[in-house]
Image: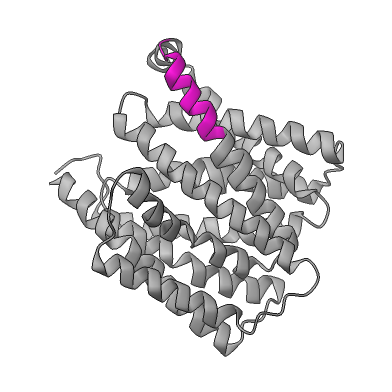
């Protein structure tokens, strides 16, 4: 038994803690958006998280690795930073400024569906029957949640923004998988460079569009918590738990976020969920989990 590998039940509890922290991010972001423009808010969060990683980079092995990166590797990391942080996280913050937290969470669950469909054309990976069932259930859940379609105010714009964000998130997932599958760049270096590039672009874009924000002490606490705890700490702990739990278990645990966010949004933001919306969410969550089952089994098998 690997002494550095946490016991299974402890790892599961740690993974649940991480998903809870990520779920609270939706609530904290909604609070902070009352005073900070969305793109600037996203840039500040991820730039501060990027700064948290700097002390860990000043080790000879990491500095040598960065110095040895090829032009092609730098290009992929810069592209990943732009797609995953600038586009994906930027649209998520913008979506949260236009839509209820639960609607944003539900739209983000489209990502494994889009990745599965994109995989047919890009990597010739045909979904299994179980995955097709999951895709069907997810679409059914979305229809149950949103029908009858009646979007007031900025909701239609918010859904368009999130649709673009889902495409960006899916593209980032495939690009990140391509980079990590090669296993010639440390995960810390991948995160550090891509987060640095994406957050700086976000921050500059926010400053150019909205000017310098007035950050109150309360919002500063939100930013520090999001950057240090919900980003730097949570991502590190999540990667640590993946040593002990299977990919299928991590997918299922991730799937609980939709329910967690719904409860937190009701408790903290007074975002009410009707019975119809609750049923739609449950169906969609089941569908999204089934879509990830095939890849999860494959990843588990590779660990043996």
Place of residue 172 in the rendered image (x, y in percent of width and height, measured from the top left): 48, 42
Quadrant assignment, res 147: bottom right
Magenta portion: prevailing SS class: helix
Q: In the rendered structure, does residue 75 fall within the stretch colored magenta?
A: yes
Q: Is residue 197 visible to us here?
A: yes
Task: Count the numbered circles shown.
Answer: 0
Tell me where the magenta segment starts and ends, as one range: 68-81
Q: In the rendered structure, does residue 255 fall within the stretch colored magenta?
A: no
Relative to residue 172, is residue 91 drawn left or right? right
Q: Which residue lies furthest to the front in this view?
A: 121
**Residue at (86%, 36%) from the top-left corner?**
212
Q: Is residue 51 visible to us here?
A: no
**Residue at (75%, 35%) from the top-left corner?**
205
**Residue at (72%, 47%) from the top-left corner?**
221
Relative to residue 193, is residue 274 drawn left or right? right
Place of residue 168 in the rendered image (x, y in percent of width and height, measured from the top left): 55, 46
- Where is the N terminus found, in terms of image quarters? top left
Relative to residue 119, is residue 196 drawn left or right? right
> In front: 159, or 206?
159
> In front: 208, or 244?
208
Quadrant assignment, res 24: bottom right
Place of residue 127 in the rendered image (x, y in percent of width and height, measured from the top left): 29, 59
Relative to residue 235, is residue 289 drawn left or right? left
Is 67 above or below relative to 291?
above
Is 228 above or below relative to 53?
below
Place of residue 262 in the rendered image (x, y in percent of width and height, measured from the top left): 57, 73
Q: Which residue lies furthest to the bottom in this view?
A: 275
**Residue at (39%, 68%) from the top-left corner?**
135
Is 277 above or below relative to 241?
below
């Amino acid at each position: 038994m690997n002494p550095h590998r946490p016991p299974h039940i402890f790892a599961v509890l740690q993974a649940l803690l991480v998903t809870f922290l990520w779920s609270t991010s939706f609530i904290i972001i909604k609070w902070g958006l009352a005073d900070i423009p969305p793109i600037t808010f996203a840039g500040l969060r991820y730039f501060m998280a990027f700064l948290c990683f700097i002390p860990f980079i000043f080790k000879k092995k990491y500095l040598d690795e960065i110095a040895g990166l090829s032009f092609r590797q730098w290009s992929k990391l810069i592209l990943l930073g732009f797609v995953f942080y600038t586009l994906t996280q930027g649209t998520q913050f913008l979506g949260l400024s236009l839509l209820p937290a639960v609607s944003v969470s539900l739209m983000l669950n489209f990502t494994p569906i889009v990745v599965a469909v994109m995989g047919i054309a890009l990597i010739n990976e045909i979904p299994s029957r179980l995955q097709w069932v999951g895709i069907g259930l997810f679409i059914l859940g979305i229809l149950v949640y949103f029908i009858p379609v009646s979007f007031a105010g900025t909701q239609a714009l918010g859904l368009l923004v999130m649709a673009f964000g889902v495409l960006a998130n899916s593209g980032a997932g495939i690009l990140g998988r391509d980079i990590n599958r090669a296993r010639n760049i440390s995960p810390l270096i991948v995160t550090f460079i891509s987060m640095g590039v994406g957050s700086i672009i976000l921050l500059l874009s926010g400053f150019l569009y909205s000017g310098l924000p007035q950050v109150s002490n309360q919002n500063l606490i939100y930013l520090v918590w999001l950057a240090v705890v919900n980003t730097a700490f949570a991502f590190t702990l999540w990667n640590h738990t993946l040593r002990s739990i299977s990919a299928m278990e991590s997918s299922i645990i991730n799937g609980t976020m939709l329910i967690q966010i719904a409860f937190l949004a009701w408790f903290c933001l007074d975002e009410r969920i009707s019975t119809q919306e609750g049923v739609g969410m449950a169906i969609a969550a089941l569908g999204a989990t089934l879509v990830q089952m095939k890849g999860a089994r494959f990843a588990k098998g590779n660990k043996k």
